[in-house]
Image (cartoon, coloured by chain):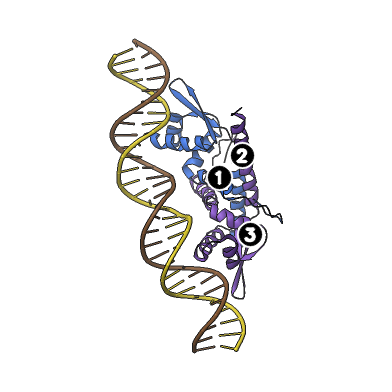
Chain colours: A purple, B blue, C brown, D yellow
Amino acid sequence: MSRRTRVRRLEGPILSSVAGVFSVLSEPTRLQILQLLGEGPLSVSEIVSTLEMKQANVSKQLGILSQAGLVGRERDGSNVRYSITEPMIFELCDLVCGKLRKDAEARIASLK
Amino acid sequence: MSRRTRVRRLEGPILSSVAGVFSVLSEPTRLQILQLLGEGPLSVSEIVSTLEMKQANVSKQLGILSQAGLVGRERDGSNVRYSITEPMIFELCDLVCGKLRKDAEARIASLK
DNA sequence: TTGACATATTACTATATAGTGATATGTTCC
DNA sequence: GGAACATATCACTATATAGTAATATGTCAA
């Protein structure tokens, strides 16, 4: 996605794919799951009890995350263990957190 | 957002704010506008004619981008000029493009 | 094979929002 | 002040999707 004087722009299908990744990350529920998995692989029921979410929803969100290539799944008996496969998402979040912090500081500064 | 053994997790309100930024970026239309503005400040009508979008929608999306602190607006007579105020978004997009490229390469490799 | 446990999926409801046509509002010039 | 041009906003429609209860499916042990 160009930000310089290059005339090459990303086209519709690419931008749709990019938007798709951001869309997956645009839900607090999914961010919570990713954050938890960032600490290590877990089964569905471990996520359910830790985050106090409904099992059906956790499975659904994990499906979305898995389909997007952000987490991987590995069967372990009757348990399925999920883990992060795309650590880049934490860089994304760090960048966004940096912006939010900057915004908050500017807002505080404007009160003085 | 933790990805190490640190026990500090981002809480609900922060994750909602993070999700909010990703949500703003989750629409191809808005990504198109940001990409165009990355090449330099433009008025609403310039964006409308360049991207062949409806004026009402462009104004609406610019409002969302402005509200999110990603673009700034400056009146210039009867024109309002918009420009990027948060260049970090291009880093976000670069990271996501890198993942998509990697995904595509893996998909191609799996065909051999 | 059955029952227990784990997980995925379905069908539905409620909510959010993209895009649009119409219109309100802002700026400039004569 | 009115007309022309630029932009923002409103009310609406159509579509997408988060979350849920119910149920289907998978695994394991007796």
Amino acid of disc 3: Leu
Give the labeled residue for mark 1: B17
Residue beneath label 2, please?
Answer: A99
Q: CA distance from mark 1 to mark 2?
A: 10 Å
Q: Position of residue B98 (x, y in %)?
A: 62, 49
Identified at 58% across, 52% down, the residue is B100
Residue neighbourhood size for the residue with mark 2, other residues' Cα within 10 Å, grouped as few (<14), some (14–19), many (≥20)? some
Q: Amino acid at mark 2?
A: Lys
**Disc 3 chain ID:** A
> Percent from the top left, x then y, of residue A49?
58, 64
Residue A29 versus residue A76: which sits nearer the camera? A29
B74 over A94 or under it: above or below: above
Identify residue for label 3. Answer: A37
Badge 2 and badge 3 both on one subunit: yes
User: Mark 1 and mark 3, same subunit?
Assistant: no
| Percent of width and height locating residue B27 | 48, 45
In this view, A32 is above or below C3: above
